[in-house]
Image (cartoon, rainbow, N blue to C red):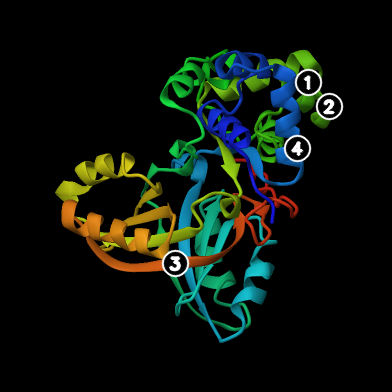
Amino acid sequence: MATLDEDDFSLIHALQIRPRASWTDLAAALGTSPTTLSRRWERLRADGSAWVIGHPRVRGHYGTSLAIAEISCVSGRASTLAQELAGWPMIITIEEAARDYGLIVTAVGLGPGDMPKLLLDDLSALPGVLGVRAHHVARLHLDASSWRVGGLDHERAQAVARIPDHGGAGGAPSAPVNPWAEPYAGITQALIRNGRSSAADIARQTGRPLSTSRRQLGQLLASDALTFRCEVAQGLTPLPIVVQTWCQVPVGEVNECVNRLRTTPGVRQVVGLPGPTNLLIGTWARSVESAMLLHEHLQRDLALKVVESAIILRQIKRLGWKLDELGRATGPLVSYPPSAPM
């Protein structure tokens, strides 16, 4: 079975802090050489053990929206349906659990009509689908870009954090940037494929002059329209148990609850949902027992009630990348579709 060593985890942790930092800056912080880091990263990226993605922020601007759908289907159909959905660009993440609503998918809509059509028509029309429970995302309190694999000690993590963000790119745009619209759509697609793409890489892919690519990339990065994250194959970490937990939190306690979840080990994602079940928490744990202990902590020490939880048995797709049984990005990337003019 493939494994990652301590140096791999150190590099992944560093890239989780500064995904676009130069090898020179990272080498100085980690006490190694740029060539060593570059070669190690190319190996990790080539076998799908780790990768960096630029993920457009979904804030309700330009008609974009985010939703989580739970899908119930006839017995024996879930895996086939998951593979079919993996080819849909709007479905960016797919997980499979042993429960009635066994497929849990995350979808992004780029226009005002995209999400209703997907949730009300397209998913329900698939052969074998018995029901769809949809949750529009009201707020992404915490996403996996804040989660750390734990490969660095505090001193080296702080050294990496002192590196300028986005590799020092600058140049603030004069107006808010829509990452799906031109002239930025091609750059966005390049950064979805490889979040560490340089201006030279983008110039080659888009056929634009290097000076133009450098300027537009700087504007896009400075606009904060994208969030960057270094992903790792979950099956190669010491945290093999993935759990999704739906909770009820009194409205007046949400902010305090979220603030405490930010510092809770294992919590990768906290999503605000409309309705009585108003918080979805995603965690990675060492064992089923430790996952249960976390649930006990949530209900005992925080002002929330656990409504339902699901242990994820298989991750099929994460932010567009198709995954193998260990969670490595070995399949093709299904890029989000370019937006229509908005």
Distance CA(mark 1)–CA(mark 4): 21 Å
Q: Secondary structure at mark 3?
A: strand
Task: Name the one closer to the observer, 135 or 246.
Answer: 246
Residue under circle 2?
A: 204
Distance CA(mark 1)–CA(mark 3): 43 Å
Mark closer to the observer (2, 4): 4
**Disc 2 and disc 1 in contact, CB within 8 angstroms:** yes
Task: Name the one closer to the observer, 95 or 90.
Answer: 95
Name the mark on residue 200: 1
Name the mark on residue 311: 3
Count the numbered circles shown. 4
Q: Secondary structure at mark 2?
A: helix
First in sequence, mark 4 or 3: give its number. 4
**Amino acid type at mark 2:** Arg
Look at the image and tell me whether residue 255 can be seen. yes
Q: Is disc 3 surrounded by few (<14), some (14 to 19) or many (20+) residues within 10 Å?
A: many
Mark closer to the observer (4, 3): 4
Name the residue located 71 percent from the left edge and 28 percent from the top edge: 197
